[in-house]
Image (cartoon, rainbow, N blue to C red):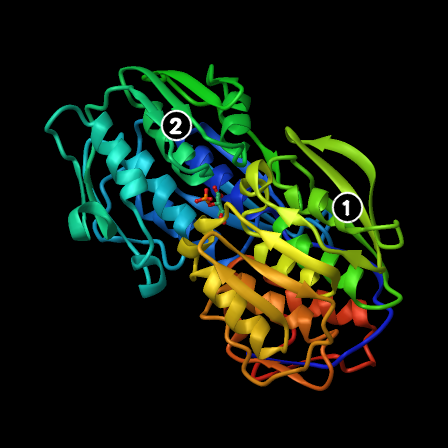
């Protein structure tokens, strides 16, 4: 799929976003370990979550997907996971393929470290380049002195990982970087470990695992940035869940609404868990005199997560400094923040974000490369970047996205404000996290403007 974009004005209308990726992964994993069936309504049918689903099926967990007849528009899919209980997984016959999903690999590594069988986790080249020592080292520590039960290429730094699980001991882990994937990996292993497992984070990463474990009967405590549970757990309750819309997907539509002149849009049913919404805080600071705006309406709680409808109006932005505790709360939103910063008055400085270098791509390099192709003024820093704005962007052919869904969506939004034509080639990776991105963006521009054109496949992808 290639996307061809032209500048537009006046995005209008109501839309929504598919289910949250992080919550869907966890609902599948915890559903698999539950005592009985769990229904996951509005789950994300994206590439990364499909990978988790297929891995769980290969571990002997039956999962069926059905259409939600009652509400076909909004919550269109339900996954029913037939939980096999904490000790009911079966040794997989083949390597488990996590495709391009770091969350699948890191969370499954924790789960599999607790299983008394052998398993291998692998994935595509993009994933096999990503660091796994951050989960391998703590899991080895839980495996007991001198007992390396988890292996990977380059002494455990890179996938594939092979795991011979069982016999875990709880211990304390002080994380060098705030990472929900690492925290969740350790907590899942902690369900199977003897004694106390404790994770101390340097900053607030997304807390869905903690919320969901508690909701399923695990006595997990959180004091500040320290999370503690005692194992081994006897059982995990099965629980039906409704997945809120993914804030990280909404971020593209929010920034489109802010940047495209004369826009006013409403994005319904978006998860606004504060460990995810750092971008809202930063964009609010950038709203300057208050012309641009994002208003959360109809705030409510759904399935243990805060949810709201977000109304976004276009307007002027001013630059800001981004660093410190907000960084893990918006770790996936830096590409789209960078685009917003190109339109802000002044220099936006991003620091403390070296983690961006080990995402689906080196996102600092990729943001600089893509924005320069569009004519922005940006300099890379070891742990972030500086962007000088506002700049009139110029459309470009083949804006590079390195197969990274978040970059591809950022350049698509850029194409709505850049002069001339912007082409994003091979944009299928968008469906890793946001299937339905293109038709939603297209609908907001108004069907007849031709601002978003897809060549090579159907608009529904
Ligand atoms: C995720 C955590 C984040 C994020 C990723 C999803 C999760 O990674 O970048 O897209 O679901 O736990 P880190 O925890 O490694 O920062």
Residue drawn at the location 83% of the way across and 81% of the way down: 448
Locate residue 181: give its quadrant: top left
Q: Which residue is mark 1?
A: 284
Q: Which of these two is toward me, 439 or 266?
A: 266
- Number of the label disc, if any, that sits on residue 19: none
Q: Which residue is mark 2?
A: 187
Compared across the picture, whether 430 is left or right of 413 comes to left
Compared across the picture, whether 450 is left or right of 362 comes to right
Q: Nearer the viewer, mark 1 or mark 2?
A: 1
139 vs 442: above or below: above
Where residue 24 sits: x, y (%)? 53, 44
Locate residue 271: give its quadrant: top right
371 vs 124: above or below: below
Look at the numbered discs 1 and 2 and tell me whether their residues touch, using CB distance below 8 Å: no
Q: CA distance from mark 1 to mark 2?
A: 34 Å
Residue drawn at the location 58% of the way across and 85% of the way down: 397
């Amino acid at each position: 799929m290639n996307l061809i974009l032209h500048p537009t004005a006046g995005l209008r209308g109501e839309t929504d976003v598919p289910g949250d990726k992080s919550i869907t992964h966890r609902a599948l994993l915890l559903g698999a370990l539950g005592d009985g069936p769990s229904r996951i309504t509005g789950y994300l049918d994206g590439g990364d979550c499909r990978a988790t689903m297929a891995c769980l099926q290969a571990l002997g967990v039956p999962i069926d997907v059905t259409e939600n007849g009652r509400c076909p528009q909004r919550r269109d899919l339900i996954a029913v996971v037939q939980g096999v209980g904490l000790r009911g997984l079966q040794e997989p016959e083949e390597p488990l393929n996590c495709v391009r999903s770091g969350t699948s690999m890191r969370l499954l590594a924790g789960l599999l470290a607790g299983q008394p069988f052998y398993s291998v986790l692998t994935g595509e080249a993009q994933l096999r380049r990503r660091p796994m020592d951050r989960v391998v080292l703590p899991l080895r520590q839980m495996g007991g002195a001198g007992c390396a039960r988890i292996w990977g290429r380059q002494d455990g730094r890179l996938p594939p990982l092979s795991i011979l699980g069982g016999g875990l001991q709880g211990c304390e882990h002080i994380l060098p970087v705030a990472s929900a994937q690492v925290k969740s990996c350790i907590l899942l292993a902690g369900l199977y470990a003897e004694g106390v497992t404790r994770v101390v984070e340097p900053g607030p990463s997304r807390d869905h695992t903690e919320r969901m474990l508690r909701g399923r009967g695990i006595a997990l405590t959180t004091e500040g940035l320290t999370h503690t549970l005692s194992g081994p757990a006897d059982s995990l309750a099965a629980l039906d869940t409704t997945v809120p819309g993914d804030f990280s997907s909404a971020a593209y539509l929010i920034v489109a609404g802010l940047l495209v002149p004369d826009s006013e849009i409403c994005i319904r049913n978006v998860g606004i868990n504060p460990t995810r919404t750092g971008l809202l805080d930063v964009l609010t600071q950038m709203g300057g005199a208050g012309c641009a705006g994002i208003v959360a309406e109809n705030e409510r709680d759904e399935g243990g997560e805060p949810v709201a409808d977000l109304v976004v109006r276009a307007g002027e932005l001013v630059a800001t400094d981004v660093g410190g505790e907000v960084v893990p709360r918006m770790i996936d939103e830096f590409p789209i923040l960078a685009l917003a910063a190109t339109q802000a008055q002044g220099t936006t400085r991003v620091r403390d974000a070296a983690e961006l270098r080990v995402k689906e791509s080196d996102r600092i390099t990729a943001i600089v490369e893509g924005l320069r192709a569009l004519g922005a003024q940006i300099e890379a820093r070891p742990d972030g970047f500086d962007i000088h704005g506002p700049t009139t962007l110029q459309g470009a052919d083949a804006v590079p996205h390195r197969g990274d869904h978040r970059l591809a969506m950022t350049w698509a939004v850029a194409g709505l404000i850049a002069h001339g034509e912007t082409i994003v080639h091979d944009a299928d990776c968008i469906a890793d996290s946001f299937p339905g991105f293109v038709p939603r963006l297209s609908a907001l521009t108004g069907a007849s403007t031709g601002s978003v054109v897809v060549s090579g496949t159907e608009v529904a992808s």
